[in-house]
Image (tube, helix red, strand yellow):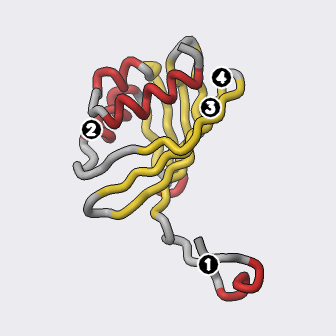
Amino acid sequence: MNAEAVVRALWDRMQARDWAGVGDLLADDVVVEWPASAERIVGRDNYVKINAEYPEGWSIRVLRVVAVGDTVVSEVEVPHEGMGVHRVASFWTVRDGRIVDGREYWTSLGQDPSPQWRAAWVQPM
């Protein structure tokens, strides 16, 4: 699989709760960072387990995937029945058909309200 296909497969397998399949796409020593919560996940087993243990009620909708060489960026929407809608911008490095590192920025829609001083130049979404 090329780099883009690996990342698309990652999201497909997460949606299917195919945790063994997710693990097959990751290097043993994968490192994924979540800067918004100041967390680093080291190792395939930890990344798979943290996703498998996430409270149920969610689904995944891939909004876009852009790939250049071994770098892939994905934007995904994750609605959750009890927690609202999350968006994630993920930056992945893929080598030899496996994800070797990633950086994901998770946020909830509307979590960062627009300040009044910008009101003259923006439109609400």
Tag 1's secondary structure? loop
Alpha-carbon distance for marks 1 and 2?
A: 34 Å
Residue toward you, 122 or 118: 122
Residue 83 screen position, x and y as percent: 31, 63
How dense is the environment of label 3, judged by Cα within 10 Å: few (below 14), some, or many (20 and up)? Answer: many
Give the residue type that dot 3 points to: Val
How dense is the environment of label 1, judged by Cα within 10 Å: few (below 14), some, or many (20 and up)? Answer: few
Q: Which label's residue is closer to the chain start, 1 or 2?
A: 2
Give the residue type that dot 2 points to: Ala
How dense is the environment of label 2, judged by Cα within 10 Å: few (below 14), some, or many (20 and up)? Answer: some
Q: Residue at x 39, y 31 (%)?
A: 12
Residue assigned mark 4: 70
The numbered disc on residue 114 is 1
Mark 2 vs mark 3, foreground winner is 3
Residue 46 falls left or right of residue 35: left
Name the outermost residue toward the bottom.
Answer: 116
The numbered disc on residue 52 is 2
Q: Residue at x 26, y 63 (%)?
A: 82
Residue 10 screen position, x and y as percent: 43, 29
Alpha-carbon distance for marks 4 and 3?
A: 7 Å
Q: Which label's residue is closer to the chain start, 1 or 3?
A: 3
When the figure is inspected, residue 36 is found, relative to residue 48, above or below; the finding is below
